[in-house]
Amino acid sequence: MMIIIKNKFDIKKMKKAGEITAKVLNMIKKYIVPGISTGELDDICKDYIYTKKKVISACLGYQGYPRYTCISKNTTVCHGIPNYKQKIKNGDIINIDISIIKDGYFGDSSKMFFVGQCSSLAKKLCKITKKSLYEAIKIVKPNLPLRKIGKTIQKIAEKNNFSVVREYCGHGIGKNFHEEPYVLHYDNHDNTILLKQGMIFTIEPMINAGKKDIYCKKDKWTVKTKDNSLSAQYEHTILVTKNGYKVLTLRKNEKIV
Ligand code: MF3
Ligand code: CO
């Protein structure tokens, strides 16, 4: 067990990586209109990441991943592979997951976008998933038992008759994309880790409107709900500070409420 505590220099670099990650998600919003393909959305993110920000995608080549971002539509839980044949249409909900590397440090964040008019269930699922992330972020401070994060998320999801995906978790992040601690999004009594100032990790709950069960498609990446229910995810990269937290991937105009 080895949780890397970040020093001042690391934190400065992680703030920069987080800021750029956040900017990609703000930049892409206006392109999300009926008729555009997820492949085209990925291309726009790629141009912004490489040409405008002069950083690189952490996704491309990660365990053989073929594109620059992950885009997951409706019943896709995560790791949707952008594709020119996959067009988005009115009523879809999509998650765009951005992971970048700036000067050797990683930033990781994702959010849901609504395409035109969405169903009340789709809107509620996204609202509750975002709330579960925000409520978990708000309790972060030194000495908090790590398992309280998952407990908070699970309680909010299940109170609304939604379910928490178990197979994927948040993760420590820094000079590695994924490192300890691993942050489950449901309660786990065995975990005795206490948060410490200088830890940086993601929280990234995946919440299904139906049952928690998932499967992975033959492409080895695309994860779907087994019961074909909608799924939503929000993700931030969080620093534990002296008295609480700082959201390193906070977007302009975003407030943790
Ligand atoms: N961004 C995801 C995470 O939160 C990982 C994406 S897998 C990749 O950890 F292959 F696309 F990079
Ligand atoms: Co992540």
Image: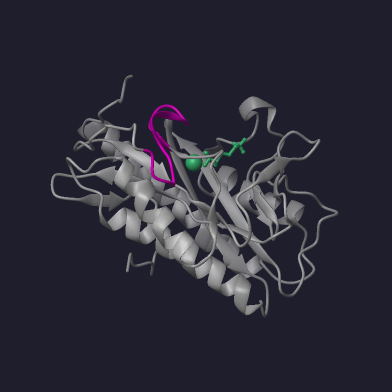
Q: Nearer the viewer, residue 63 or 102?
A: 63
Q: Position of residue 251 (x, y in %)?
A: 41, 61
Q: Position of residue 30 (x, y in %)?
A: 61, 69
Split into 4 quadrants, where in the image is the N terminus?
top left
Return the residue found at the far left: 243
Q: Nearer the viewer, residue 92 or 24?
A: 92
Residue drawn at the location 13% of the way across and 49% of the way down: 243
Return the residue found at the far right: 85
Toward which corner of the image does residue 3 lie, by quadrant? Answer: top left
Residue drawn at the location 27% of the way across and 37% of the way down: 11
In the image, 165: left or right of 10?
right
Residue drawn at the location 76% of the way across and 51% of the way down: 39
Q: Which residues are magenta?
A: 171-188
Relative height, residue 123 to residue 227 (above, below): below
Relative height, residue 172 to residue 1 (above, below): below
**Whether residue 16 is visible:** yes
Q: Position of residue 238 (x, y in %)?
A: 33, 46
Secondary structure mainly formed by the magenta segment: loop
Q: Nearer the viewer, residue 228 or 48?
A: 228
**Residue 35 lies within the magenta run:** no
Toward which corner of the image does residue 241 lie, by quadrant? Answer: top left
**Whether residue 251 is visible:** no
Name the quadrant where ligand 1 sits: top right
Q: Position of residue 33 (x, y in %)?
A: 70, 71
Split into 4 quadrants, where in the image is the C terminus?
bottom left
**Residue 186 lies within the magenta run:** yes
Residue drawn at the location 21% of the way across and 43% of the way down: 144
Query: Disc count in the image?
Result: 0
